[in-house]
Image (spheres, helix red, strand yellow):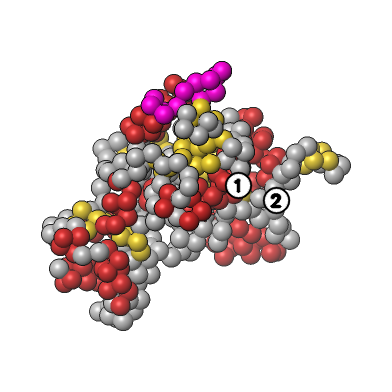
Amino acid sequence: MTDPDESIPNAVPYLAGKEWEYLKECLDTNWVSSIGPFVDRFERDMATYLNAKHGIAVVTGTAALHVALLAADVGPDDEVLVPSLTFVATANAIRYCGAWPVFMDSDAKTWTMDATKTSEFLARECELRRGALVNRATGRRVKAMLPVHLYGHPADLDAFLDLAKRYPLALIEDATESLGSRYKGRRVGVSGLAGCLSFNGNKIITTGGGGMVVTNDDQTARRLRSLTTQSRADLAEWIHDAVGFNYRLTNLQAALGVAQLEQLDRFVEAKRATAEAYTQALAGLPGVEVCTEQPWAVSNFWMYSILLDPAIWGSARKVIDAASAARIQCRPLFYPIHRQPPYQSCPAYRVEVADRLHARGLSLPCSVGITPAQRDRVIQFLSHLK
Ligand SMILES: *Cc1c(COP(=O)(O)O)cnc(C)c1O
């Protein structure tokens, strides 16, 4: 029997491997800071896992996005195409560069940046001026696309790669939620100029806080390494060739990362088993649209989410509050960023689906360590609400 009063969290870390052993090794050997054997090993192991040439470990996923954009030459008053439905960090990283987001809509099936509307925006609203791609309405230069593999499901990468060939645009992947997911067989994060990962506490693996940029491009890797270490140009002298950042991950955090990465395949299996259990149980309920996977995708199902028909269920917020009263922690989908105070004046192109998803969606408890009994409690709760 499970305790009906036990609280079921949305998503919490699962530390079941060699985390303790590796952390102790750091303390025993005095390697605790931003240089150390676990940093090198974490970068190497992650690059191997993703089949990428380089991994550059950084302090957060947000920092990964910031330096990846800088490495793509995104600068003041440039524009970057980004989905409105994502965590705010994706857009914030663009502003850190002094650039502006242009918000794109979500695809109704994958909930990720709509490649068809993006293509339409580029064809209708932009033009080439002396080799530069310019947004006619703002007069600003469009430099990059930053699709997000939202909640674990890959964006349609080949469509974005095609746009990156047709226009002078860099492709950077926000893969912070999708480590372990695949697009047409290949891992997400390695298709464009750079991919960004996060190891925040509720991501599929965690280092407490942390991130990484992965790239196959040698020059980009060198730039990223330099930018994240205060652009120190000369290791013998205090000479810095640009304004850099102190963004390096510590050996302590990397030790956790190495231990977590060793368990990633099992974590993905656990997330997928949870997704399957929810889908089987909930697909038959009236007015429920379950989380699906495109035929070309393998999702890590980082954050299992469903849509509720408001005619049958009322508002998603009401269901989240009722779940909370039953000690089940659901969460709303991200609030579309083009509606957020710091971003309301930024351009948005025909964003409609993102708003509809936000109004109807919620994410269910889906920790790696969630038990079948806990899942059943979530399923029973939803079944009885209806
Ligand atoms: C978590 C997340 C980030 C930022 O990662 P942090 O490590 O928390 O800085 C960026 N983008 C998306 C879509 C995320 O979910």
Q: Secondary structure at mark 1?
A: helix
Q: Is residue 294 above or below residue 5?
A: above
Tag 2, which secondary structure?
loop
**Image-based side of 238 in relation to 3, left or right:** right
Residue in the foreground of this view, choosing between 340 and 234: 340
Q: Residue furthest top?
A: 130
Q: Which mark is residue 246?
A: 2
The spot of residue 178 in percent (x, y) is 42, 47
Under mark 1, the amino acid is Tyr
The residue drawn where x is 48% and y is 30% is 135
Image position of 171 with respect to 210: above or below: above
For disc 1, the marked residue is 96
- As for residue 128 lying within the magenta part, the answer is yes
Quadrant of residue 213 within the rendered picture: top right
From where the camera sits, is residue 6 visible?
yes
Magenta residues span 122-133
Image quadrant holding the C terminus, namely bottom left
Find the residue positioned furthest to the right: 237
Residue under the point 22% across and 53% down: 290
Badge number at residue 161: none
Which one is in front in this view, the residue at disc 2 or the one at disc 1?
A: 1
Q: Find out whether residue 132 is within the magenta segment.
A: yes
Q: Position of residue 199 (x, y in %)?
A: 52, 54
Separation (CA) of disc 2 from disc 1? 15 Å
